[in-house]
Image (spheres, coloured by chain):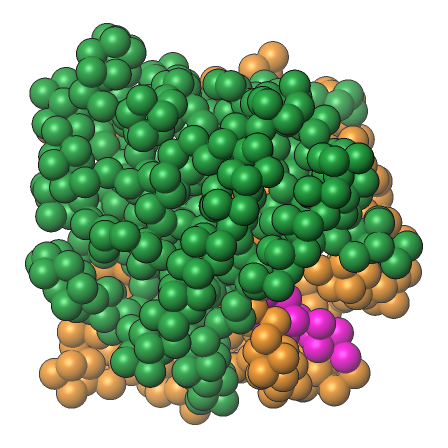
Chain colours: A green, B orange
Amino acid sequence: MRYRPASRTRDIAPFHVMELLARAQALEATGREIVHMEVGEPDFPTPEPVVRAANHALIDNKTFYTPALGLPELREAIAEFYHTRYGVTVPTQRIVVTAGASGALTLALACLAEPGREWVLTDPGYPCNRHFVRAFEGVPVGLPVGPESNFQPTPTHLDACWTSRTDGLIVATPANPTGTMLTHGELKALHAAVAARDGHLIVDEIYHGLTYENNAETALAVSDDLWVVQSFSKYFQMTGWRLGWLVVPEAYVRDIEKLAQNLFIAPSTPAQHAALAAFEPDTLAILEARREAFRHRRNFLMPALETLGFRVVARPQGAFYLYCDCSELAPDSFAFATRLLEEAGVAATPGLDFGTHCAAQHLRFAYTTDIPQLAIAIDRIRHFLQA
Amino acid sequence: MRYRPASRTRDIAPFHVMELLARAQALEATGREIVHMEVGEPDFPTPEPVVRAANHALIDNKTFYTPALGLPELREAIAEFYHTRYGVTVPTQRIVVTAGASGALTLALACLAEPGREWVLTDPGYPCNRHFVRAFEGVPVGLPVGPESNFQPTPTHLDACWTSRTDGLIVATPANPTGTMLTHGELKALHAAVAARDGHLIVDEIYHGLTYENNAETALAVSDDLWVVQSFSKYFQMTGWRLGWLVVPEAYVRDIEKLAQNLFIAPSTPAQHAALAAFEPDTLAILEARREAFRHRRNFLMPALETLGFRVVARPQGAFYLYCDCSELAPDSFAFATRLLEEAGVAATPGLDFGTHCAAQHLRFAYTTDIPQLAIAIDRIRHFLQA
């Protein structure tokens, strides 16, 4: 049979950083020590009370399917979390437990993306978003954003890019790769602008909790008529468990249930039992201590990079990334990232992984490693730049 | 914003049995005891050595992402399993660990399904298959199959239903809902017929291991040029963990990796560490004892149902289902399933959940409960039919 993949595969980009990571691992195999600042994953393991809850559930034989929309008690715990943390009432019925934010995006876009219709996404932005749109035959339209709008979309942007072919907007707050956030007022204005066009609004809130200036406000406080993608990966540090959730406008719950039954059967049972402990006071105390650790890293790394000639283009209010303009140090960030790895032993993610808008002049540094490692990285980059 | 789901959602059917299950749970809440023969899930919990491996991995903080294609050592263990169980050499490189067979079907059809192009699937068959095709804008074409071909497709069927619009065939052996199997020769003939048409062949082998007459032969012994979907759910009894695998023709591995990175990031880490123990001798001994239990149940239930007037339309060689023609007992299997539940306290799955071909005259009984329960069910159905 001829090699004949579906046309969409031509539009699905690999994670370019994976090539760097493979090279980093090859260097490590030869004895080199690499500082990893390319990984979008907290370096902290899952908090012990969460692990303990999973261990107990497994010993109790909690290894069977749950309902497609998730364990009722976990959906209730998430609703309660919205109440206590944000003061927002979200009906349990609208909360769908998913196989990570990835599963949430699959369900949302399988439900909403119409073939040939456009979705607006920021460039730079989380690269998988445009691929979820493309997977379901929607057309992702990159909206170039920069420091002038804090790397976030505005109603004015929508005036310019929304056409009769556009169906929706995907935003993230805090955003990846910049860590910038949308205020309640900005979210409200964006929602109004999308609603006025009868479009869909999906808000990615997976970095909520990892904020260092103001607490994030959930888009669910703005309207019931939008979709929120959330995750147990980042703040709750459960990356490998693959668990998240999706908050769905009431009218779509039944469609999402049908899709979840057919595409997933159910989310992971051990992960769901583990996650029941994620909202316990003991766990939250651990998570808040780790948030402080991230804050210290950010406060150490940001001025250190700026001293070296990197320009942190938007003050990151959340997540664990610094998106830097490196154009005064090198003409092409991909080649620069390769040299940083080979010659300085520091791995960072080139802008190319987040879109095409000014990609060659940006690098993302993740502070998902501790301050001693960050200090080594800064020293190495300094020597490299002076060489 | 108007309620405006994507058109595909209109073609995604719910699991009809879920309505019966919800009703069964409502009856149980009033104190009724229901015999559950509707569930496509082994009643055995995950074997203890597998649970123990997960607990150890969690205590060792194995909670981070793995590579997108899965833990290298698990991919190797699966390759080794093909060698020892089937005597077939499968390059580790072609084995992709997935979030259940569901994840495997997502990846395969995201990679292969071209919008508007047709895929042939048996009717009756596992209902989600056609929805995976539809989700990626392919066109599922039901191929009516019956006892004359053991509910399996043949090259003659393909002569009749394959058109210039057809891109592929999905088969299952053992099949759901019938438990019928394809021999090596039949698989070879089907592969040749598909290859002659330059089509794709996907073979669902998720019930391998749960066979009661001959051991199943893997389609991988027939050709490298086909796709195999597998699961840790059924034989390995790890349903809730959501773990499976996909064997990919060499040429597509890179496309699948890009899709897996973007759509899933990675499969569940705790589940993968658990699964490393699935191929251990201790585990296999437990699984083989349970296979014997399933065999005894089948041998008890099949004649008992036949005595009551159900016609087991194809001798089930595997899986844990009996697909019965109930047309001599009732004109409509959905209404009959409802009455069996309400009046006899026995839950079974109506044919409607597996397609439309003769659906109203069939019911599927799962022997995923023990013989004492099956005996109660038979007694209850007997009394119901005599009433």
Residue B61: percent from the left, percent from the top?
Answer: 59, 75
Residue A64: percent from the left, percent from the top?
Answer: 44, 74
Residue B237: percent from the left, percent from the top?
Answer: 57, 73
Residue at (59% x, 42% y) in the render: B261
Residue A41 appears left or right of A286: right
Residue at (72% x, 35% y) in the render: A385
- The image quadrant where one finds the N terminus of chain B is top left
**In front here: A186 or A109?**
A186
Residue A8 quadrant = top right
As displayed, is residue A175 above or below residue A50? above
Residue B372 in view of the camera: yes
Residue at (42% x, 68% y) in the render: A290
- The image quadrant where one finds the C terminus of chain B is bottom left
As displayed, is residue B71 above or below residue A346? below
Residue B247 in view of the camera: no
Residue B290 quadrant = bottom right
As displayed, is residue A322 above or below residue B20? above
Q: How many marks?
A: 0
Q: Give the magenta range.
A: B269-280
**In front here: A273 or B111?**
A273
Residue B337 appears left or right of A368: left
Residue A178: percent from the left, percent from the top?
Answer: 42, 37
Q: Is residue A375 magenta?
A: no
Residue at (55% x, 34% y) in the render: A310
As displayed, is residue B362 above or below residue A196? below
